[in-house]
Amino acid sequence: MVPTSYYIALSGILFALGMIGVLTRRTAIMVFLSVELMLNASNIALVAFARSWGDLTGQTAVFIVMTLAAAEVAIGLAIIVAIFRKRETTNVDDLAAMKG
Amino acid sequence: MMIAFILLGALTLVGGVITIAAKNAVHAALGLVGTLISVAGLFATLNASFLAATQVIVYAGAIMVLFLFVIMLLNANAPITGRDPIPFVRELAGLGGVVLAGSFVILAVSYKDPRPLAEATTALGGGSASVVGETLLTRFLLPFEAVSILLLVAIVGAVALVQRPVPQPDDVPDSEPELLAPPVGSAISRGGNQPALQHRNDEGEVRA
């Protein structure tokens, strides 16, 4: 049995990798790929906690996170395609039209 | 079991580094595929067999196909090089990442299991589809239904976002009277009177 803390440490490192990717990459698609890394890191932690407590709640939450990620990717990539048609770029620095 | 964890964990981290560091977007997506499959293996070592299968099918299969499709559709595999909006953004992000990872590792080391792992693992029932499905449809029925509505909204939203703009009657220029009344029911009647020609080329690429 691998201790739960190993899994949580791995999850934290993967989450930090995803955060670095979100902050440094300039293409919107690459930012999305990094967000997927962070979601997977949270999934590892949820399943590890589910085994630690002997409770299936964590595994169920992973199922819902997966569905959310699929919906997010569908909508986000549709937005990226729509923006690319209009602006010919997906550089997140150039897409500051709303100044958000 | 420990050897499996070390191998899968190393593969996960290598895939993650490829994802955030690869110059080519297709290489980054393939690195993420490696990470996702390794995470599925980690789920299998955590007594979550149904989630491991779902991870491979949904994440490594469906979502990554969507990513690769859009990357190739938009010709986004060339890297964007140029000025950074914030100076030292890479160094700052690296420092923040190291601090975040370090604090997570410290938190993880301080975590103690509430009861013995072998005893807790038997309560999971192997994480098979039947036990996960039973939890999903009893204790988590409301979130389950909410997710189904969310998926419906996502489908409708994606279709609405990428469809070609339906021209309003006011937009039709007066100089093209033959476009005012396209033949009813024909396949191109909805988008046939686009003013700009490059839109049609765009759509042709989308369909190809």
Image (cartoon, rainbow, N blue to C red):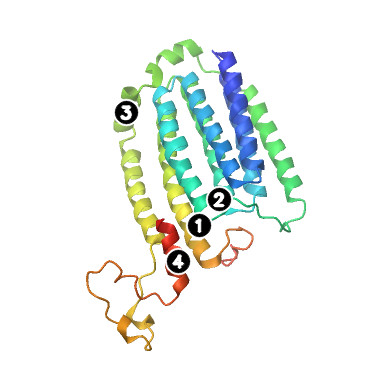
How many other residues sit within 10 Å of disc 3, few (<14), some (14-19) or many (≥20)? Answer: some
User: Dividing the picture into quarters, in which one does residue A7 lie?
Assistant: top right
User: Dividing the picture into quarters, in which one does residue B102 lie?
Assistant: top right
The secondary structure type at the circle numbered 2 is helix
Residue matched to label 2? A29
Task: Confirm or deny contact between disc 2 and disc 1 (CB under 8 A).
Answer: yes
Residue matched to label 3? B133
Disc marking residue B12: none
Task: Give the left or right position of residue B190, taking residue B204 as reference.
Answer: left
Q: CA separation, marks 2 and 3?
A: 33 Å
Q: Earlier in the sequence, mark 4 or mark 3?
A: 3
Q: CA separation, marks 3 and 1?
A: 34 Å
Q: Nearer the viewer, residue B39 or B57?
A: B57
Query: Which amino acid is tagged 4?
Result: Asn
Provide residue B188's location: percent of width, then percent of height: 31, 69
Disc marking residue A80: 1
Residue depicted at x 29% and y 32%: B137
Discs 4 and 1 share one subunit: no
Residue depicted at x 65% and y 49%: A25
Say which of marks 4 and 1 sits in front.
4
Query: Which amino acid is tagged 1?
Result: Ile
Question: What is the chain letter for disc 2?
Answer: A
The relative height of residue B4 versus residue B34 in the rendered view (above or below) is: above
Discs 4 and 3 share one subunit: yes
Provide residue B172's location: percent of width, then percent of height: 36, 82
